[in-house]
Amino acid sequence: MVGIEQLRRPGGRAVQVLAVAACYYAAARLGLLRQLTVEGAIVTPVWPPTGVAVAALLILGLRCWPGITLGAFFSVLSLTTPGPDVLVILFGNTAAPVCAALLLRRAGFRTGLSRLRDGLALVFLAALGAMLISATVGVGLLVLNNSLPAHSFWTVWLAWWVGDAMGVLIVTPLLLLLSGARRPLPLRRWKEATALAVVACLLIPLAAYSPISMLFLVYPLIIWAALRFQLVGSALCVLLTSVTATVAATDRHGAFAGLNRIEVMLKLQAFNGAMALTALLLSAVITEQRNTRRSVEHACQELVEVLEHLNAGEAPPPRPQSAAESSDHRDDRPWPTGAP
């Protein structure tokens, strides 16, 4: 509690803003390592800073938004000398994640991602919905500056929008889960987790770099991870697969060999999107079903105890809070004080 109270002070908020800016900038540098050229415009298949920005707003509150703007500014500064139009770029890069956080808050989103509705909200509101802002503002500015011909607007816009959305779908769930992690896996689960990691490290490069299109092989791996480790396992598999596939696509190797730039972009982003959606929604369904089963089992146990006391002529014991209810309360964490 002391640490939280300290972060609520002006100095603590300044540290939060600087930390968000640093993470945003680092994610941008990682995203720029792999680029695609579409209609003369350089785009990234996955733009991790959008995922970092949405996660920061959900974890720290809306008052950390200046860190997103600051990180975006330094990202632009590392690429070119900014002009007056940089304000428009900063507006688009900041408004999109802020809008995503507001939409999720309105929808009653839980950062624990323990319900199917949380997964659907993250997909359709934060990723596919709010990222329309950054894509429209960014590509519209290129057209207005005559840096991009008007007839190329929709092609570049689609690549920009999907890249931003993939950042939310791939990065945000992982950061949310890491922020809420409380206890390590038991030893017996670590053995299975190690086996899953070994299989992933062998299978994913094979699927991405094989001259025969074998990208479908990663789906059984994601299903295994989701069934046994829920979103933590499936999100890590998706991240590793997305990075490997992006490297293979930008180098035109494996399943992406012989394709032109538009075909590479479409195939890579369709694969990343389908994979992220499968992992997120499947994990949410499994987690929700497990929580429901635990609630039913606990309710049955309580009913048996009440009946035993009534048959003995005793008053039923006070009802303790169940583990499932405790989990629900942890997942339904209130928004940070920084959120207005």
Image (cartoon, grey):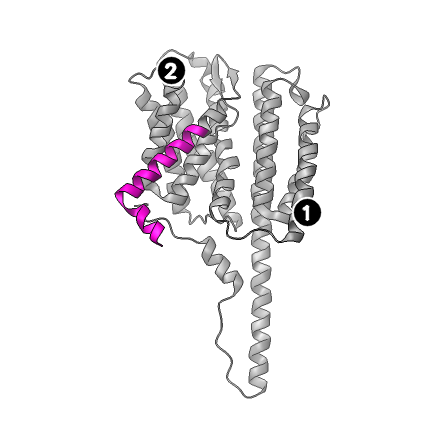
| Image location (x, y in percent) of residue 334 | 39, 52
Which residue position is annotated with label 1?
A: 192
Please determine whether, in this image, residue 161 is positioned above or below residue 296.
Answer: above
Q: Which residue is at the front of the view, 224 or 123?
A: 224
| SS category of the residue bearing label 1 | helix
Determine which quarter of the picture holds residue 78.
top left
**Mark 1 and 2 residues: CB-CB less than 8 Å, in contact?**
no
Q: Does residue 183 belong to the magenta stretch?
A: no
Residue at figure coordinates x 59%, y 23% from the top left: 247
Q: Please state the total of marks drawn on the protein image.
A: 2
| SS category of the residue bearing label 2 | loop
Please determine whether, in this image, residue 281 is positioned above or below residue 247.
Answer: below
| Image location (x, y in percent) of residue 138 | 39, 22
Q: Main secondary structure of the magenta part?
A: helix
Q: Which residue is at the front of the view, 198 or 90?
A: 198
Q: Residue 59, which numbered label? A: none
Please determine whether, in this image, residue 244 is positioned above or below residue 114.
Answer: above
Residue furthest toward the left? 10
Residue at figure coordinates x 56%, y 57% from the top left: 291
The type of residue carrying mark 1 is: Glu
The type of residue carrying mark 2 is: Thr
Which one is in front in this view, the residue at disc 1 or the one at disc 2?
Answer: 1
Q: Which residue is at the front of the view, 322 or 184?
A: 184
Residue at figure coordinates x 59%, y 47% from the top left: 230
Q: Which residue is at the front of the view, 10 or 220?
A: 10
User: Magenta stretch?
Assistant: 1-26
Q: Does residue 14 belong to the magenta stretch?
A: yes
Mark 1 Cα-neighbour bin, 10 Å: few <14, some 14–19, many ≥20: some
Which residue position is annotated with label 2?
A: 80
Residue at figure coordinates x 68%, y 21% from the top left: 254
